[in-house]
Image (cartoon, coloured by chain):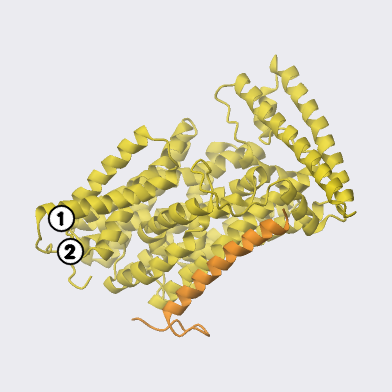
Amino acid sequence: AEEPPGVPGFRTWRGVYLFVFVFFVLSVLGLALFSRVFR
Amino acid sequence: MNLLDWLVLLGTILGIAAYGAWHTRGTRAIDTYFKGSSRNGWGTIGLSVMATQASAITFLSIPGQGYDSGVGFVQNYFGLPLALIIVCAVFLPIYRRLGVYTAYEFLGRRFDTKTRVLGAALFLLQRGLSSGVTIYAPAIILSTVLGWRLDLTIIFTGALVILYTVTGGSEAVSLTQKWQMAVIFGGMVTAFIVVLMRLPDGLGFTGAAHLAGAMGKLEAVDVSLNPNKRYTLWTGLLGGLFLSLSYFGTDQSQVQRYIGGASLREGRLGLVFNGLLKIPMQFFILLLGVLVFVFYQFDKPPVFFNQVDWTRHAVGTNAPIFRAIEERHAAAHERVRADIQTWLTVRDEDDAVEEATSRAAMVAAQKEVEALRAEAKSALLAADPRAKTKDSDYVFMTFILAQMPHGAIGLLIAVMIAAALSSMSSELSALATTSTIDLWRRLRPQAALNEGRNIRVAKWITLFWGLFAIAFALFASMAENLIEAINILGSIFYGVVLGIFLVAFFLKWIRGTAVFWGALTAQALVFILYSNLSIGYLWYNLIGCAASMLFSVVFQKFMGPAQPSLEEEPEV
């Protein structure tokens, strides 16, 4: 059955997927920043 | 390796295998044998998915990749989180709703038997062959540097996997993978701490990162559109997305890890866990390789990291040539070390011009060392045209054996073997499930109702695939080019299979006959392109997938609206 994610702060699966996407974007930006700081 | 190392190595590897076999020896239910326990939560599923993907080569080669080329390889994984979102939202709910054991069983429900058998056959062909590579690749490296016999290393690892995978099926795989991942995480964190401790006093992580950055090893994101560059943001996003979607969505060795479990929610959260952790984890492993590179700027590295091969060829008329290269390499390394010390001193004095000058001198000296490493590889090739000149796979093992304390050496060797076992056990279990469900049951429909007989047959088939993998790995040691061929084979089939699944999910008006012939035509096109073009393997996933979908559409249009196939599940 389609059940809610049951993760604190997330009411829908769409919210979980959006979080994964935002985390991915932040990871890429974080890596780019890391490269820049230690250039 | 001393007694302590052997105790750690055998204690962890044999202990986990025995635990998995013992705990699952009573598995009688077909669902548990093929899908794992229905009580498995997201943590078990997430670790199982991660352990299946992380083979021994991940931990042997990727630090070497970081040493050689820096952290840019991390871009290869940029498509993975996006692919896992699609698998969570589209693939997994349908697999669970239909209660299928294999991804190809879904193709049978959606299309027809011939499409199901095509998907299963392509999987068995590529995964059956690559399971041999899964044990051969680490065995050749470990046997070379540790002086073990290659054939015994292959037979030992293969027999261990067969023992617990035959006994407990998918449940034994999930159970052992949890502990194998614990060994892997523990070992890699230990290695990271030891590398940091081995760096010169006062340098620390920040100093090491600044030095690696100055040497061009920390360029993690490359936004250039140059098609000749191997790893860029765009190849990672597009090529990586299609590769990950094929692997996680349609490869039974992964599908089997997440279609079991307590509920749809647990499966989804297990995949989300991987979507969040994979990029940071791969970056961590690459960064470990970069730190090993920094360590070897202060401690003289060998000119060629596969020292066994280098020493073996440094005889007779080659001896003076090899020795001359070693002496020039040692002198060049001394210059690099002196230039680094100058740069570190100048960097603290806040003089930008002086800093830029000393940095340029340091980078130039490092380029000289790299040129000498290239010269060493050429000399090796001149001495033996069949010699393997790729030594990056030996970088991390060289560091482990020379710099790690006893006990930690055993733990790191256990990491490599645990990673090989965890990947191979998933492959064997998936091969057996697909062979039993998609092929044997088609031939013996009456026997399909007998649960005990299904498990007995699956155990024999698991044993067959395990022995096949061992035999193939032993044979591969005599024909090295086979390994390269197997790796290419995977990327040539993956895209077309993904195309079949995407048609199944998104183009509901297309029927089995159109997609079957569309896929075969697309596969022929990919073979033709492969023979005539030299483009990166990642792109064949995209081309194969697009061609498979396009030909399916064209054939269905040409054939006109078709009747649903007899097997078709109306609700899909």
Same chain for the residues under marks 1 and 2 in the image: yes
Q: Residue B509 carries which label?
A: 2
What chain is tagged by disc 2?
A: B
Q: Mark 1 points at which residue?
A: B556
Looking at the colours in the rendered structure, which chain would you say is drawn in yellow? B
In the rendered image, the vertical position of residue B152 relative to residue B502, given as above or below: above
- The reply to whether callout 1 and callout 2 are in contact (CB within 8 Å) is yes
What chain is tagged by disc 1?
A: B
Q: Which of marks 1 and 2 is nearer the N terminus?
A: 2
User: Would you say residue B6 is visible in this rendering?
Assistant: no
Amino acid, disc 2: Trp
Residue that lies at the very extreme toward the top in this rendered image: B317
Residue placed most toward the observer, B27 or B309: B309
Spot occupied by residue A7 in the image (x, y as percentages of width and height)? 50, 82
Looking at the colours in the rendered structure, which chain would you say is drawn in orange? A
State how far apart marks 1 and 2 are (Cα).
Answer: 8 Å
Residue that lies at the very extreme toward the front in this rendered image: B353
Q: Which quadrant: the C terminus of chain B?
A: bottom left
